[in-house]
Image (tube, grey):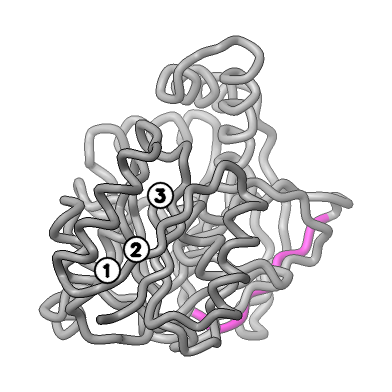
Amino acid sequence: MKSAYVIVNAGSGGGHDGDQVARLTDLFARYGASAEVHLARSGSEIATLARDALERRPDMVVAGGGDGTVSSVAAVLAGSELPFGVLPLGTLNHFAKDLGVPLELEGAVARIVGGQPTRVDVGEVNGRVFINNASLGLYPDIVHDRERQRKRLGRGKWLALVWASLAALRRFSFMHVRLSVDGRQRLRRTPFVFVGNNAYVMQGFAIGERMAIDRGRLSLYVVQRAGRFRLMQLALRALVGRLDQERDFEVTFATEIVVESRKKRLRVATDGEITMMTPPLRFAVRPAVLVVVGADPARAEAG
């Protein structure tokens, strides 16, 4: 029987408790794996458990939670050859969706236990790993304000997000940045810089989807002809699924990206987690360093 070391974020999604531990233990046993399930109640505890799993070398390590949880565990496992599975127990589950992991819990467990390992890339910025994307400018400010409203005003996540977005669009000052893209220099005035681990689809309703995570490249998205009214138009088109990649973004693919700014510190979002970083920001792709189990084979072949 395979051994699985499972790390579940107790606060992700609607929350998880001892009943979820028992359910996961039973599901893994049903599909041929002995699962040791741990509930983590903080980001530091998630990282500590991931390091413990790395030392103990089970047949697989599984992270259950949102993209922040998955990213924290992936950062520890990248380069280790230890198979990594993802349970979509968060709110958005971008990484699980891009892998083609079933969003229903039993289906995800069955795929993870019975699936074949495949390799995917991760990105990093100033040494911090990300599995989905990293950004600076407007989006990190919105996330920062959203969390402030949740803690101080007690607003729900989605209501806080709406208010934070409206406030950011009203007050945000545009950034002047120097971009070095595989050595090619360019200056831009923009509300945000978005760097993806491989290419994202910014078209119609497929906003933020990736068809492949194993092409060994970063994608860089900068808003074209940025202005405050233009930014409002872009936000509205995103809400109704009318984005057009060629019209709305300057898109470049690279293996190394450097972002320079006059500011001494920049707020950077990596997989939804906010960190203050000192520029220059150095982005790189680490190809095929994460071994995942549970990805949809048909999707991998199509990608």
Q: Earlier in the sequence, mark 2 or mark 3?
A: 3
Please state the horizontal and vertical placement of residue 64, each as a whole percent of the image.
Answer: 38, 54
Q: Earlier in the sequence, mark 1 or mark 3?
A: 3
Please state the horizontal and vertical placement of residue 268, each as a whole percent of the image.
Answer: 66, 51
Question: At 59% across and 48% down in the image, what residue appears?
Answer: 273
Q: Secondary structure at mark 1?
A: helix
The answer to whether 231 is drawn above or below residue 4 in the figure is: above
Question: Mark 2: few, some, or many residues within 10 Å (few <14, many ≥20)?
Answer: many
Question: At 60% across and 80% down in the image, what residue appears?
Answer: 55
Q: What amino acid is labelled 3 in the image?
A: Gly
Q: Secondary structure at mark 2?
A: strand
Question: At 22% across and 86% down in the image, what residue appears?
Answer: 116
Q: What amino acid is labelled 2 in the image?
A: Val
Count of labels shown? Answer: 3
Q: CA distance from mark 1 to mark 3?
A: 15 Å
Which label lies toward us, 1 or 3?
A: 3
Q: Residue 99 — which label? A: 1
